[in-house]
Amino acid sequence: DCSLMTKLSRKIESSWYTSKKPNVVLRLLAFSFGLLSGIRKSLYSLGILKQIKIEVPVIVIGNINVGGTGKTPVTLWLAGILQKQGVLVGIISRGYGGSLSRREPIFVSKNSKAEEVGDESLYLARELDAIVCVCIDKVKAAETLVSHGAEVIISDDGLQHYTLARDFEILVIDASRGFGNSYFLPAGPLREQPETIQSFDYVLINGDDENLDQNWLKDTRYTKFRLLNETVESLSEQSRESISFFSGSEVLVLAGIGNQERFYTSLKDFGLIIQPVVVDDHGES
């Protein structure tokens, strides 16, 4: 049952952000995950495992923990800046939730279907004049984008895909949740140790950083930002209205994003009375 799985995944994820210590089995699995993750990254750093360099600059945006941090909005923002400078941008998206096989590159257009290519990739294709491609193989996706004229590649959520050599890495952190209980998967949300923060070229912190250990940010180039929701769009009428127009109204809210609480709070700040509809990341109910 999809609804049961959604509730179960939410319960597991919420446990990562409590002070309760994970059970011993999860901690052992987390230790194994962290060890293998560190070894794998070291093998690439030492050149034992090969990285493939693309002929155009590659910018990788991602996080070191599971869940939404604001990567896709950052991708949208950065691609928009490059486009204004006349650069043809190629974007690699996960295509998460799409039904189509992603073993070979799939181009995403404004007319693509979210259930086939994923909601994030369709969102990027509709908002940008960029070439958007989904593929499990990031190198293959990048090479395909270059063959279609891309002058810069942005990989959305690609930090741990080390085979694709990169020129610039941007780490995005959700300040409201930080790194949770600081355990590796599956006992916690981490894919990499927080101590690796200093190795990234730039860090973007989504929100205020009072929940972050300041030692992690030492000797790190970082900027704080906030995602602001200002308008809502009527899908039936293709029109937009300020969120403040609905102040005092009771509304049902369905949010297929990683950190739903942050979105709910932003709506409450506009005076909306919200009734959440529980779905998982990317909207599976």
Image (cartoon, rainbow, N blue to C red):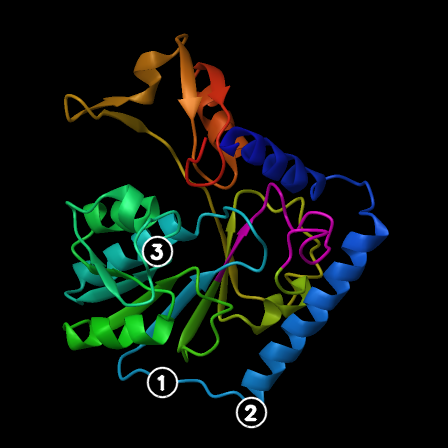
The tag on residue 53 is 1
- Residue range corresponding to the magenta coloring: 171-190
> Does the magenta-highlighted stretch encompass residue 167?
no
Query: Residue flagged by tag 1: what amino acid is it?
Result: Lys
Sequence-first tag of 2 and 3: 2
In this image, 98 relative to 160: left or right? left
Q: Residue at x 52, y 38 (%)?
A: 259
Q: Nearest the camera: 278 or 54?
A: 278
x, y percent for residue 272? 43, 15
Sequence-first tag of 3 and 1: 1
> What is the quadrant of residue 184 in the picture?
bottom right
As helix, strand or loop, the secondary structure at mark 3 comes to helix
Query: Residue flagged by tag 2: what amino acid is it?
Result: Ile
Q: Residue at x 18, y 64 (%)?
A: 85
The tag on residue 75 is 3
Query: Residue flagged by tag 3: what amino acid is it?
Result: Thr
The tag on residue 48 is 2
Mark 2 or mark 1, which is nearer to you?
A: 2
Q: Nearest the camera: 259 or 265?
A: 259
In this image, 220 relative to 247: left or right? right
Q: Is residue 273 above or below residue 212?
A: above
x, y percent for residue 268? 48, 20
The quadrant in which the C terminus is found is top left
> Does the magenta-highlighted stretch encompass residue 175?
yes
Crowdedness of circle 2 by 10 Å Cα count: few (<14), some, many (20+)?
few
Provide the major secondary structure of the magenta segment: loop
Crowdedness of circle 1 by 10 Å Cα count: few (<14), some, many (20+)?
some
x, y percent for residue 242? 28, 22
Q: Is residue 273 above or below residue 74?
A: above
